[in-house]
Image (spheres, grey):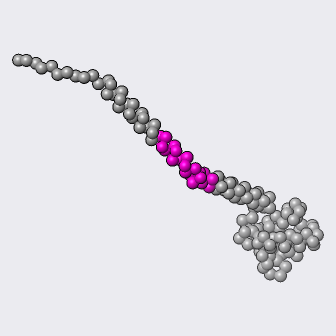
Amino acid sequence: MTAEQEKIAEGVIQKHRDKEGVYDWNDFIEAFQTTHSNRLVIGRTLIEKNIVCRHVTGSTRLTELGWNFKGFESERKSIIEKEERQNKIEELTLTKLKFEQFPAKFWWLIILITAFISILTTLVNNQIEQSSKQRETPQTEILLKK
């Protein structure tokens, strides 16, 4: 639909709301001063989008979606936001999967790092023990005679 047709369609939806959900399409051309072809395009689009449904010959009624319809521009923005959100979710999922695969790909690197830390810890512990033994001074016992 063109921008003009969307504007008219939003007016039709408002007419439905004003008349408690039912609108007679016979008044359409006079109310909106537009062509019969625009009426057909707008009518088909509103029915396809499930905003209105056929009620009685020549009239339609709003569906639940029609009562909550905010406009074509906000609908487009909503669709774009959903697509962006979905793309972001996919991107984050792929990133997460890549990081979850890291341990599986580099298992040997994890073993090397663990071995290095173990050896380093053992060496440091031995150095601490040796330095504490050197600091201890031999204590001699002094026998006190009575």
> Which residue is at 46% across, 37% downward?
120
The magenta segment is 96-117
Q: Is residue 121 above or below residue 33?
A: above
Closest to the observer: 6 or 33? 6
Q: How many marks?
A: 0
Name the image quarter holding the N terminus.
bottom right
Magenta span: predominant SS is helix
Instruction: Report whether 42 appears left or right of 111.
Output: right
Asked if the magenta segment contains residue 104, the reply would be yes
Residue 11 position, x and y percent, is: 83, 64
Q: Quadrant of residue 49?
A: bottom right
Q: Quadrant of residue 25?
A: bottom right
Residue 14 position, x and y percent, is: 79, 65
Asked if the magenta segment contains residue 136, the reply would be no
> Which residue is at 80% across, 72% downward?
48
Closest to the observer: 102 or 65? 102
Residue 125 position, x and y percent, is: 39, 35
Is residue 64 visible to the viewer in this orientation of the structure?
A: yes
Q: Quadrant of residue 119?
A: top left
Residue 80 position, x and y percent, is: 76, 57
User: Residue furthest toward the bottom?
Assistant: 57
Q: Is residue 55 above or below residue 72?
A: below
Is residue 30 visible to the viewer in this orientation of the structure?
A: no
User: Residue furthest toward the left?
Assistant: 146
User: Residue furthest toward the right?
Assistant: 35
> Which residue is at 80% across, 67% downward?
13
Closest to the observer: 25 or 52? 52
